[in-house]
Amino acid sequence: MIMPEVEVKEAERFMVESLVAAGAPLTEAKAHADLLLHADTVGHFSHGLNRLELYINDIQSGVCNGNAKPVILKETVATAWVDGCEGLGATVGNFCMNLAIEKARECGVGWVAVKRCNHYGMAGYWALKAEKEGLIGMSFTNSAAIMVPTRAKKSANGTNPIAMAAPATGGDSIVVDMATTTAAMGKVEVQICKGEPIPEGWALGPNGKTTTDPQVAFDTGRLLPLGGFEKTSGYKGFGLSAMVEVFCSGLSGSRATHNVPLWTYNQTEAPNLGQCFVAIDPGCFAPGFEERIADCLQHWRNMEPVDPSLPVLAPGDKEKNNAKATTARGTITYPQAQLDSYKRMAESIGVRPLEVYVQ
């Protein structure tokens, strides 16, 4: 299926103008658009334009305060507890990761936990902010309950992603960014837009059996943990989700995942998510950190693949390759159904619709 293309600058223009029309200040709209555009650029379409309308609705309904400024509630030289004041994900994320970076530069580590947050996009985006400063970055967030814990019938945990990025020599890096479910719900939404099934093992239907129908999976809201069922070690994904919960709601005082309302297009209640941002200075440890990471990366990449047409990739390579291809092409592909939906949204908020790229 050939999908329409949109120029990267046009996608950015539309995101910024839409957020401003909804009530966000221009500075915060640009920051949030950068967050969404990063996801589409690296090929994670679930967290890019796909999410824009949800953010617009949150601002318009008052669930998200586009003008909010996070507040430090308590801090030490290495830690901080922050109130996100229900701000935009990029507003809170930039404040907290910048704070963690500042603390890491001062004493080697910065650990920031924040309550009263909204969705903050790709977790890896925030880890990369620290990596670009020569630090190890980590980021975590909880979410609404859409993961079915091992042996349970209903959802109780979130996708609760884990992200880590670390620098290597020559501008290289390792980047780990993953949901603790088999896939994020946004990827199910993308399959709905494409009109394509989801893989077996992503989600359960209302009967407790696996489904490949993305609409059924979305409506039921029962994603399997990373690893799937108990016999395939799904309890490990459940355990990782629980660990993230400790870092997020446990440290910040936010709602635990099982008390977070589902993120919908008619949201009326602030989610009060918990998030965690970490920066670590590798210079405080054994010398030669970047060289050792580079050695690992090259060793993995040089391994003999099972299929010669599919080389072994280091964590983060797929996204880097996608970003290079997007930059070279200058366009992003979106499903027609998604563009149709955003045309309707643009008309409702008084913004010029996305223009499709014509060669």
Image (cartoon, grey):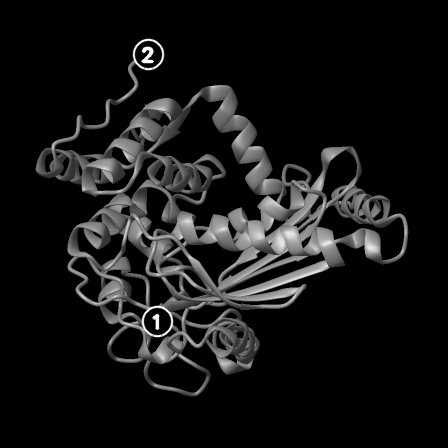
The C terminus is located in which quarter?
top left
- How far across and down, in percent of the image, does residue 314 sit? 68, 47
* Left or right of 179, for residue 169: right
Q: Secondary structure at mark 1?
A: loop
Label 1 or label 2, whichever lies nearer to me, is 1
- The Cα atoms of the two marked residues, 1 and 2, are separated by 41 Å
- Residue at 71 percent of width and 49 percent of height: 135
Q: Is residue 209 visible?
A: yes
- Residue at 67 percent of width and 42 percent of height: 133
Which residue is identified by label 1?
146
Q: Could you classify mark 2 by the number of other residues whose Cα lies within 10 Å: few (under 14), some (14-19), or many (20 or more)?
A: few
As drawn, 276 above or below 296: below
- How far across and down, in percent of the image, does residue 229 sit? 48, 78
Which residue is identified by label 2?
359
Q: Secondary structure at mark 2?
A: loop
Determine which quarter of the picture holds residue 177. Answer: bottom right
* Left or right of 293, for residue 142: left
Q: Earlier in the sequence, mark 1 or mark 2?
A: 1
As rendered, which of 105 and 328 lies closer to the eye? 105
The N terminus is located in which quarter?
top left
As drawn, 356 above or below 248: above
Q: Amino acid at mark 2?
A: Gln
Q: Could you classify mark 1 by the number of other residues whose Cα lies within 10 Å: few (under 14), some (14-19), or many (20 or more)?
A: many
- Residue at 42 percent of width and 48 percent of height: 90
* Left or right of 357, for residue 232: right
Q: Amino acid at mark 1?
A: Ile
- Residue at 38 percent of width and 67 percent of height: 273
Residue farthest toward the right in the current orientation of the protein = 287
